[in-house]
């Protein structure tokens, strides 16, 4: 029942058994505050109750100093050399701090540190459609780092997700503009470079604060269902390149030799030409001189030419056939046999072959001269 109802003995719940208020009324608030002050004074080294039961003065200044010192110490923070700190003051961008020791008021400023030099890697895979309506499986890796701390922290809600979506978009655009053979083998470097350029454009447009370092097309292949056929095509293409290289190597070996041979033959032809021309000029000069001699003494010159010609012809043959006028037999002189027979003899007979040849030559010449003189006389007589 209530304390003020009949039968409740009129007991006030604030009376505390009548300890502080003998009338059973509510407790004295001033007394409660004095007790609390005495307890706090005891905790902070304050004196006991003053004369007359008054509590000592509470050291509020000391509490304020302690709180201020703690607040100040909590505001210091260190930014490493590879980091930048984005400072928000009351939820609004304030500044970006570089490396060193800094202080910001706690509970007012919010500091976010980001690593500016760490190179991170993002990997994406998927099946994409090429320009020639073929499907290709692509594996792409992107290496990137944070270039603008403010944009990375504040401009985009989820920079990593934005990077993934931008990478997929850029890669699909580039692959969709290339052929299957180009993506798999021929133009992989161009695909990586174009993807990196387009990806960086997207990231700058979104203000993500991310800088792309390298884009690598680590793998590109046809779908598993047709992989065997494409392996055959790739092998054939490699054989084609190998055969071209072998042919080029053979050409590099043969062409210089052919060019050298052609140059040598050209030089030989030029030398032959020069020799023939000079020989012809010499013959012309000799003929002109001989013509002068012939005009002065025709008979002597004619006979001399005849003898020189016979000597030149006889010196180049090893057999001589002599037809005797008014005779039924023909003289055969085996000069080569005579020379061999004389060579097989003793040393004192080595000069015999030369002597025999000279004698035979002289006899033939005399015989020819005699026949020529007889022929001239017969013509004169007639």
Image (cartoon, grey):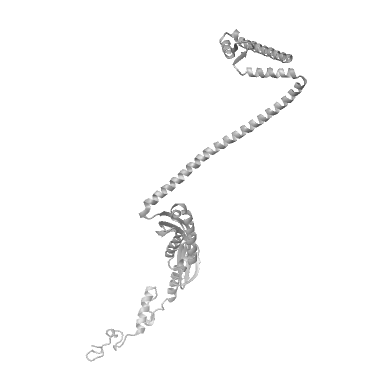
* Depth order, front residue of 280/198: 280
Decide: is 69 above or below 141: below
Decide: is 246 above or below 147: above
Q: Is residue 147 left or right of residue 40?
A: right
* Depth order, front residue of 30/253: 253
* Depth order, front residue of 238/259: 259
Q: Using the rendered view, name the quadrant where residue 367 is placed.
A: top right
Decide: is 303 above or below 144: above
* Depth order, front residue of 348/190: 348
* Residue 150 makes an appearance in the image: no
Q: Using the rendered view, name the quadrant where residue 282 is placed.
A: top right
Decide: is 29 above or below 230: below
Q: What is the x, y in percent for residue 75?
A: 46, 68
**Residue at 37%, 81% in the rendered image:** 34
Q: What is the x, y in percent for residue 112?
A: 45, 66
Q: Quadrant of the N terminus?
A: bottom left
Q: What is the x, y in percent for residue 349?
A: 60, 8
* Residue 223 makes an appearance in the image: yes
Q: Residue furthest bottom?
A: 6
Q: Quadrant of the C terminus?
A: top right
Q: What is the x, y in percent for residue 52?
A: 38, 83
Q: Residue furthest front?
A: 382
């Amino acid at each position: 029942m209530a304390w003020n109802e009949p039968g409740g003995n009129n007991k006030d719940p604030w009376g505390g058994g009548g300890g502080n208020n003998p009338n059973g009324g509510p407790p004295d608030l001033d007394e409660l505050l004095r007790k609390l002050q005495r307890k706090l004074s005891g905790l902070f080294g304050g004196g006991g109750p003053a004369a007359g039961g008054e509590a000592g003065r509470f050291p509020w200044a000391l509490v304020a100093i302690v709180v201020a010192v703690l607040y100040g110490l909590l505001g210091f923070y260190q930014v490493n050399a590879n980091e930048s700190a984005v400072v928000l003051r009351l939820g609004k961008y304030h500044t970006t701090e570089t490396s060193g020791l800094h202080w910001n008021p706690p509970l007012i400023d919010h500091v976010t540190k980001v690593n500016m030099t760490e190179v991170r890697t993002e990997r994406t895979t998927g099946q994409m459609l090429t320009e020639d309506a073929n499907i290709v499986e692509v594996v792409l890796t992107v290496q990137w780092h944070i270039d603008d701390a403010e944009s990375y922290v504040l401009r985009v809600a989820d920079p990593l997700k934005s990077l993934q979506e931008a990478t997929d978009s850029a890669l699909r655009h580039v692959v969709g503009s290339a052929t299957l053979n180009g993506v798999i083998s021929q133009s992989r470097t161009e695909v990586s470079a174009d993807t990196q350029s387009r990806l960086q454009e997207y990231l700058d447009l979104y203000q993500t604060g991310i800088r792309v370092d390298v884009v690598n097309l680590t793998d590109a292949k046809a779908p598993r269902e047709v992989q065997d056929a494409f392996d055959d095509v790739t092998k054939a293409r490699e054989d084609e390149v190998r055969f071209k290289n072998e042919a080029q190597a053979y050409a590099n070996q043969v062409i210089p030799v052919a060019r050298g041979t052609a140059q040598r033959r050209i030089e030989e032809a030029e030398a032959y030409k020069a020799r023939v021309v000079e020989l012809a000029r010499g013959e012309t000069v000799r003929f002109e001189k001989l013509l002068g001699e012939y005009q002065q003494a025709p008979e002597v010159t004619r006979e001399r030419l005849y003898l020189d010609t016979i000597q030149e012809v006889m010196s180049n043959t090893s057999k001589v056939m002599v037809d005797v006028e008014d005779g039924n037999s023909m003289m055969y002189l085996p000069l080569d046999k005579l020379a061999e027979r004389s060579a097989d003899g003793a040393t004192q007979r080595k000069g015999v072959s030369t002597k025999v040849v000279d004698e035979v030559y002289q006899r033939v010449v005399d015989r020819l001269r005699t026949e020529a003189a007889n022929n001239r006389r017969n013509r004169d007589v007639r």
